Image (cartoon, rainbow, N blue to C red):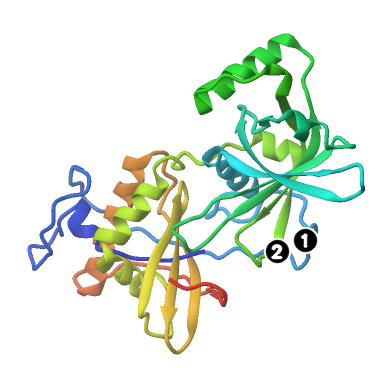
């Protein structure tokens, strides 16, 4: 994942020590609180060598599980590619809009022609989520495409569709995909991890999903000094970072992409000191980490940082 650092201190909290600081309007009005010494632990998770070798959702306590990531992707998306097997034996993928219920079950409204194409209920729905233009996590849901017969269920799905897209639909065209398993991938050209249907249903989408893009854009636009400072303080690097950018933020931390002319590009995961549940908590954690990094850089206080030692090299995308 990615590590990026911007000038978070001036946008969230002023330095505790009355020295030179950049005076910019605060991003969010937080109350200043005393900082405690913390030990930040960072980790990079790995994926199995072959697709399909992993059957459970657990990867790292510093990173959301693949089931959570999949649920977040479908919650933030409304279009995907539905693949079916047609009567001539060829698989066919068509673009569709979809909504999801509380368990992440995809709800689709198919056209008459599309509804009659499939000769088998087996289908897949591929969904992608672009993050900061740098990474595209995605999931492929495999399951049975079917039309509910219960009138009460159809009415509920119709109401769900109307809330999501603001339009009426013919209940006869409403279909759902009964999820059997999910393949979650971090990006293009990456291996994937299989998630069971029960893990997928029981997982919760990330609580920061609706504000994550906003936070990332604000930090990348206004707080680049802190982004670079995070690289030097929280990551164990043996090269100079020429460019850095934050990619995504979630309840457990954030991802950054680093670039070095000599070494290439790398993704880094930096966890929060503790789990956050909302936008205010995420920005407060950034404030704390920014202040501690500033103090460490200026040698005002010694902090016990456990730096990231593993980076994932990226060879197919830039900043």
Judged from the image, the secondary structure of the residue bearing numbered disc 2 is loop
Q: Is residue 254 above or below residue 147?
A: below
Work out which residue is located at the far front of the displayed protein and give it: 113
Residue count near mark 1 (Cα–Cα under 10 Å), binned few <14, some 14–19, many ≥20: some
Could you say where residue 314 lies in the image, as x and y percent from the top left? 55, 74
To which quarter of the image does residue 220 belong? bottom left
241 vs 127: above or below: below
Q: Earlier in the sequence, mark 1 or mark 2?
A: 1
Q: Residues within 10 Å of mark 2 (few under 14, many from 20)?
A: some
Q: CA distance from mark 1 to mark 2?
A: 6 Å
Query: In the image, which disc is placed on residue 191?
Result: 2
Task: Determine which quarter of the picture holds residue 70.
Answer: top right
Q: Which residue is mark 1?
A: 51
Q: Residue at x 66, y 67 (%)?
A: 189
Q: Position of residue 295 (x, y in %)?
A: 22, 67
300, 224: nearer the viewer: 224
Are dots 1 and 2 in contact, CB under 8 Å? Answer: yes
Q: Quadrant of residue 36?
A: bottom left
Numbered label attached to residue 77? none
């Amino acid at each position: 994942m990615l590590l990026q650092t911007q000038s978070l201190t001036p946008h969230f909290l002023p330095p505790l020590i009355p020295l030179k600081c950049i005076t910019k309007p605060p991003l969010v009005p937080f109350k200043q609180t005393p900082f405690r010494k913390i030990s930040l632990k960072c980790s990079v998770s790995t994926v199995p060598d072959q697709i399909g070798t992993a059957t459970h959702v657990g990867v790292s306590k510093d990173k959301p599980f693949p089931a959570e990531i999949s649920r977040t992707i479908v919650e933030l998306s409304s279009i995907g590619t539905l693949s079916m097997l047609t009567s001539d034996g060829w698989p066919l993928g068509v673009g569709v809009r979809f909504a999801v219920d509380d368990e992440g079950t995809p709800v689709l409204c198919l056209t008459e022609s599309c509804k009659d194409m499939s000769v088998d209920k087996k289908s897949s729905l591929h969904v992608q989520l672009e993050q900061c233009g740098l990474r595209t996590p995605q999931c492929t849901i495999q399951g049975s495409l079917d039309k509910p017969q219960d009138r009460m269920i159809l009415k509920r799905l119709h109401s769900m569709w109307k809330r999501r897209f603001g339009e009426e639909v013919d209940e006869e065209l409403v279909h759902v995909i009964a999820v059997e398993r999910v393949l979650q991938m971090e990006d293009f050209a990456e291996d994937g991890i299989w998630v069971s249907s029960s893990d997928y249903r029981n997982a919760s989408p990330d609580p920061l999903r609706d504000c994550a893009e906003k936070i990332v854009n604000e930090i990348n636009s206004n707080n680049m000094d802190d982004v670079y400072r995070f690289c030097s303080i929280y990551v164990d690097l043996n090269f100079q970072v020429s460019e850095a950018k934050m990619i995504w933020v979630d309840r457990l931390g954030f991802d950054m992409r680093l670039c070095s002319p000599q070494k290439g590009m790398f993704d880094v995961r930096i966890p929060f000191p503790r789990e956050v549940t909302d936008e205010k908590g995420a920005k407060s954690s950034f404030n704390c980490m920014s202040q501690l990094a500033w103090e460490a850089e200026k040698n005002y206080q010694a902090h016990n940082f456990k730096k990231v030692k593993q980076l994932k090299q990226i060879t197919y995308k830039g900043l």
